[in-house]
Amino acid sequence: MNQDVDQNIFETIRHDDRQAFERLFREYYRPLTAYAFRFVRELPIAENMVQDVFLKLWQNRREIVITTSLEHYLFRSVRNHSLNQLDKAKVRSGYLKMQMESDSSHEDYTPFFPEPGLLNKIEAAISALPEKRQEIFRMAREEGLKYREIADKLNLSIKTVEAQMTLALKQLREALKEFHPNVLFFMLTGKGFSGTSCQGGRKGM
């Protein structure tokens, strides 16, 4: 997004346009989660922090003043939230602090966005998996089922499900090795491949 488009979208959100907010959430959720993961190193924590940032954006939409761009505001908010999280956990290292401060000096967040054609190639790579392996992968990543649930549904052992998931991820990474590894990690490990839903800034609210 460019700054003019950013401003237009934020103005519609400021006037209670939930559909615009939903579109914004879907576009930025994965990139922001990948960015947060760099600092906190735990996917559930990274996801929760991004959801918190969107929740606050919606709740404070009429009071927030954005002087740069909406993209920069979102990434900066996630960075600050990550710093607070590390402070609370008392596990912040000098390296992480330096890295986070360095990130605030520029606005190049492109490595955290899906590269052109990635979604189509991911779907093609998944479709090329052996039938049972593909079924297990889709149940885990698209339906969000746990390995025990998949094993029960398919009458398999958990070890078989784990082995098939390991093979699926290995095959997919090989098929998609041309893409940026950070983005690919989140596209393959997140639940679903068509975007994440947000109601008022948090999934499932």
Image: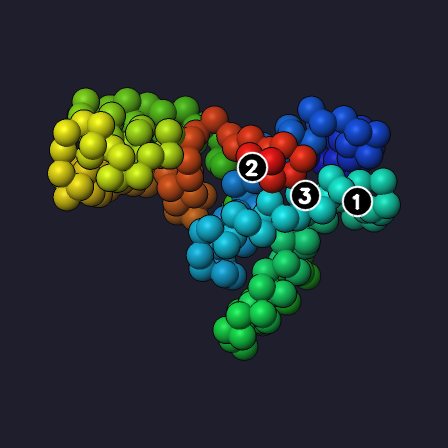
Q: In the depicted view, which residue is nearer to us: 45 or 166?
A: 45
Please name the residue that numbered disc 1 is placed on: 60
Q: In the depicted view, which residue is nearer to us: 21 or 148?
A: 148
Secondary element under disc 2, as helix, strand or loop, is: loop
> Can residue 196 be spotted in the picture?
yes
Please name the amino acid that badge 3 sits on. Answer: Leu
Q: Which mark is residue 203?
A: 2
Ranked by sequence position, the earlier of labels 3 and 2 is 3
Where residue 92 sits in the image (x, y, percent)? 53, 73
Q: In the depicted view, which residue is nearer to us: 115 or 89?
A: 89
Q: CA distance from mark 3 to mark 2?
A: 10 Å
What residue is rendered at 28% in x and 22% in y?
A: 127
Please name the residue that numbered disc 3 is placed on: 55
Which quadrant of the figure contains the C terminus? top right
Where residue 115 sits in the image (x, y, percent)? 48, 36
Please name the amino acid that badge 2 sits on. Answer: Lys
Where residue 54 sits in the image (x, y, percent)? 66, 43
Please name the amino acid that badge 1 sits on. Answer: Asn
- Give neighbour class at mark 1: few <14, some 14-19, many 20+ (Cα, 10 Å): few
Ranked by sequence position, the earlier of labels 2 and 1 is 1
- Give neighbour class at mark 2: few <14, some 14-19, many 20+ (Cα, 10 Å): few
Where residue 200 sits in the image (x, y, percent)? 67, 35
Position of residue 75 relative to residue 152, above or below, is below
Secondary element under disc 3, as helix, strand or loop, is: helix
* Disc 3 and disc 2 in contact, CB within 8 angstroms: no
Q: Is residue 164 left or right of residue 108?
A: left
What residue is rendered at 41% in x and 24% in y?
A: 120
Q: CA distance from mark 3 to mark 1?
A: 9 Å
Q: CA distance from mark 2 to mark 1?
A: 18 Å
Ranked by sequence position, the earlier of labels 3 and 1 is 3
